[in-house]
Image (cartoon, rainbow, N blue to C red):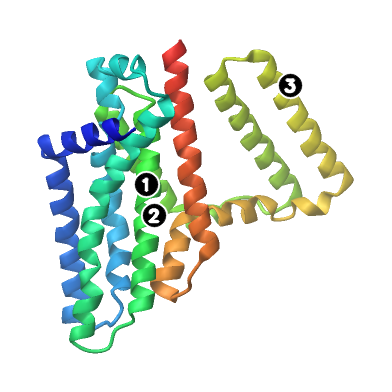
Amino acid sequence: MAAIYRRELKAYFQSMTGYVFIAFVVLFIGIYFMAYNMMSGYPYFSYALSGMVTIIMIAIPVLTMRSFADDRRTKTDQLLLTAPVSVTKIVAGKYFSMVTVFSIPVLFSTVCPLIIKMNGNANLKADYAAILAFFLLGCVYIAIGMFVSSLTESQIISAVLTFGSILLLLLWTNLVGFLPTTAFGSLIGFLILWTFAIFFIYRLTNHHWLATVLEAGGVIVLIGLYIWKKGIYDRALTKLFEKLAVTDVFQNFANHSIFDAGGLVLYLSIIFLLMFLTVQSIEKRRWS
């Protein structure tokens, strides 16, 4: 894994992608810091980080688009897949190289609360907690971009799909309001979600009978629960999706000064899940 990590990290700076990404993010951190904290006098650096959520939505797809898509396009992925190293280590090496690039502008941002402290009152605990949440949110976005990149050989398609996925997460809370809240509507929603999940499993495994059995079993269980205890479906779909609002976790840190430990666990869980899915995507192509 260390060799993959060094190779990928070196490639980001040889191609100038790393320098451009760092400069772009640091530039906007400085702009928001000056606007909110230096000129407007807000004592919370977390306000500046709130504005940065939109900026990394643009920057991170550029960072992640080449992670696997470029290897597929140039056929260098064949060298990686035949190397004496597991796919898990390949995925981890690439992921941590991108996280390292992202961590550099985040480290620059840690100076900003100290500057606020030097010029007046500061809330260091709240600000550094918000920086931690911002960093992990960025790591979630990187994991999304890496997974999307593993599905295509076009860097442009990878960047566009990653941008769309992150935009969807930003709008998540508003979109949840359109979901049905009735028990029957929630049942239909869960059936659709289960079907999508089984289709995804089928695409990864190509195991027709496994997909059929899981689909039938899930449908029977969901409908059986509805018949047995209809009330458990009231607002169930809405409540489930509300718990998956990843940007709300960051807002708890940034705007409400709440240390959301459960939200950080959610971030780490999403990262591990997406890394696992990326491994399965590569493994499928390896043996197909």
Mark number displayed over residue 106:
none
Question: How far apart in space, not on screen, are marks 2 and 3 (Cα)?
Answer: 36 Å
Residue for badge 2: 137
Of mark 2 and mark 3, the one earlier in the sequence is 2
The front one of 47 and 100 is 100
Determine the secondary structure under disc 1.
helix
Image quadrant where one finds the C terminus: top left
The N terminus lies in which quarter of the figure?
Answer: top left
Residue that mark 3 sits on: 213
Q: Are marks 1 and 2 in contact (CB under 8 Å)?
A: yes
User: How far is disc 3 from disc 1 in space, using C-alphas?
Assistant: 33 Å
In the image, 208: left or right of 100? right
Tell whether label 1 touches label 3 (CB within 8 Å): no
Residue 131 seen in the figure: yes
Residue at (81% x, 54% y) in the render: 231
The residue singled out by tag 1 in the image is 141
